Amino acid sequence: LEGRKLMRWYFPSKYNMQDFRVDEYFEMQAERFEEREIHHSVPAFQALLSEAMQHREELRSFFRQVDEATFFASPSLQDLYGAFRFVDPDHALPFEVPDQIFRQHTPLVGEEPPFRLATVDRELCMLWRELRKDLDADARLALDARLSRLNTIAEVREVLMDLAGELGVVPPLGGVV
């Protein structure tokens, strides 16, 4: 493990620790993988997305009325449009927005994002809300992160139903006749 050539490749040598014990190595790994405190911006961002989701229809009608000059002159409107598009795939604006301001993407990655559940599957959205009530803050953030990585409604349904079974939450049947 001596020498500059090997220092670039082997983990402890990379940090110029030529002589180490196995317990020191495990201590380094434990520190590396220990859970870190959630950054204060994550709950604020989640609250912003929740607000945007709740007021989607109002935002859509607002953006349909915004003229091009006003939109391009206001960074706040551009940021609000970004938050709106994060939870809703509708373009809403009557004009095209250049990629420098907003790059077109599918909301929350994938073709069927979880935040579009309210328009696609009301019962699944209600189940998601019920499950969130039974989870602590860290578990809610973990669940939302996990759901955001899924690509289809079927995958979201499977994850939520499995979690409902684990927690003993009865799926809401409000829309079933």
Image (cartoon, helix red, strand yellow):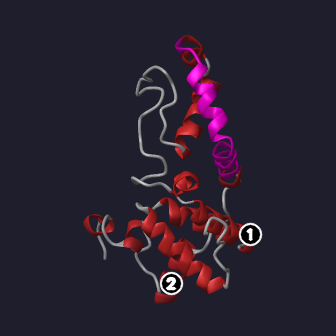
Whole-percent x and y of residue 151? 40, 60
Residue 43's place in the image compared with 77, above or below, is below
Q: Please report the residue visible at 59 percent of the width from the left and 60 percent of the height from the top.
A: 122
Residue 149's place in the image compared with 26, above or below, is above
Q: Please report the residue visible at 63 percent of the width from the left and 40 percent of the height from the top.
A: 56
Q: Is residue 120 visible?
A: yes
Q: Which residues are magenta?
A: 45-68
Label ID, residue 173:
none
Relative horizontal placement of residue 48, taking residue 1 as reference (left or right): right
Q: Separation of disc 1 and disc 2 at Cα?
A: 37 Å
Relative horizontal placement of residue 11, taking residue 74 as reference (left or right): left
Q: Quadrant of the C terminus?
A: bottom right
Residue 59 occupies quadrant? top right
- Point out the tag, 1 or 2, that comes first from the N-terminus: 2
Label ID, residue 26:
2
Prevailing secondary structure class for the magenta stretch in the rendered image: helix
In this rendered view, identify the residue nearer to me: 96 or 58. Answer: 58
Relative horizontal placement of residue 19, taking residue 136 as reference (left or right): left
In this rendered view, identify the residue nearer to me: 112 or 147. Answer: 112
Q: Quadrant of the N terminus?
A: bottom left
Q: Is residue 79 visible?
A: no
Kindly identify which residue carries mark 1. Answer: 133
Whole-percent x and y of residue 144? 58, 62
| Residue type at tag 1 | Lys
Residue 20 occupies quadrant? bottom left
**Of discs 1 and 2, which sits in the foreground?**
1
Q: Please report the residue visible at 50 percent of the width from the left and 70 percent of the height from the top.
A: 157
**Which residue extends farthest front?**
177
Judged from the image, the secondary structure of the residue bearing numbered disc 2 is helix
Q: Does 149 lie within the magenta span?
A: no
Number of marks in the rendered image: 2
